[in-house]
Amino acid sequence: MIRDGWEETAETGRSRKIPRPRSLRTWRVGTQVHELGRRSWIMGVLNVTPDSFSDGGRFLDPGRAIAHLIGMAEAGADIIDIGAESTRPGSDPVPAEEQWRRIGPIIKEISRESLPCRLSVDTSEPLVAGRALEAGVDIINDISSLRSHPELGRMVAEAGAGLVLMHMRGTPKTMQQEPKYDDLFGEVRYFLNEAIRRAMDAGVDRERIVCDPGIGFGKRVEDNLDLISNIEELDSLERPILIGASRKSFIGKILDLPSDERLEGSLAAHVTAVLSGAHIIRAHDAIATIRAARLADAVLERIRER
């Protein structure tokens, strides 16, 4: 018998956890309505920064950045998330004008292309978000969940854009200073429910929101492992769940590897997340992640058919 993701065998009476079909969620972006859950969506990462923990400095040249973006889109990425500010543990904020100086030329140039994907900007700054939305960006990925600048929610609402809200204790500067949870899932659920409320108070339609539990943002290794393997614990949010474990430090700690050697660990984490219920995977290695996710999707589809 299978119930709530657990299978009890008649022979032994023992229970074991098995993957279960993902919850289906509606996500409105612009004028389109997407049903998420039948397959994994992949969000490719484009960092236009000199100091990101994973690929800092690789894509500061606009031409190289645009070529990489187009490559991810043509390979099948559903979203490209463009960021101009490193949010690695201990990092300092980047002024809004500097963020826009880094990504503005790329967004303006790429908006002329007919890409088979959505564009997202990773920022908590209203100035950056506003200019990006005016230039045709579809989604704002705000790791502060509107705590830094609540007015950003109004801008998203007026544009009819999608919005990603993420759980994080403190700020990137302070988040890894001895994080500890008495009730990990209870705190993440409460935080994200409050973030959803803030967004809706600003006029954002609930169906335009995606929730991210914030892998690596104020989490211990065990917290990250618990989150990626128990995403069903976030079902009560009734929103699509995004997981971004790509090259994160918990993978490095487990495998004792630097950030540029964490591909296999990232793929394992993301496949686990898909089988646990994640709807969107945010990854630097988009092509490899697309392939791994498709296999995980096939497993879930087989389970759905049983």
Image (cartoon, rainbow, N blue to C red):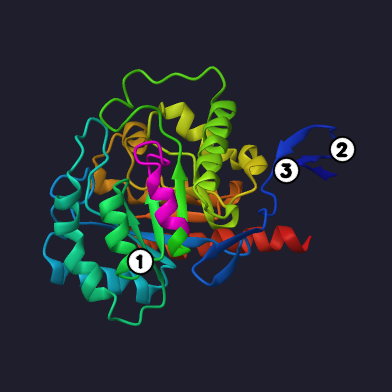
Position of residue 14 measured from the top left corner of the image (x, y, whole percent): 80, 32
Give the magenta range: 143-157
The numbered mark, 1 or 2, whose residue comes first in the sequence reads 2
Q: Residue at x 47, y 57 (%)?
A: 157
Tell which tag, 3 or 2, sits nearer the viewer.
3
274 to 213, vertically: above or below: below
Position of residue 233 measured from the top left corner of the image (x, y, whole percent): 63, 37
Q: Is residue 225 magenta?
A: no
On the rendered image, what quadrant is the C terminus found in? Answer: bottom right
Which residue in the structure is indicated by mark 2?
11
Position of residue 44 measured from the top left corner of the image (x, y, whole percent): 36, 61
Extreme right residue here? 10
Gap in angstroms between the C-alphas marked 1 and 3 = 37 Å
Gap in angstroms between the C-alphas marked 1 and 2 = 55 Å
Which residue in the structure is indicated by mark 3?
5
Q: Residue at x 46, y 54 (%)?
A: 163
The numbered mark, 1 or 3, whose residue comes first in the sequence reads 3
293 to 193, vertically: above or below: below
Please, what is the three-letter code of the amino acid marked with disc 1?
Val
Which element carries disc 3, helix, strand or loop?
loop
Q: Can residue 284 be seen at all in this image of the molecule?
A: no
Q: Residue at x 53, y 44 (%)?
A: 201
Please, what is the three-letter code of the amino acid marked with disc 3?
Gly
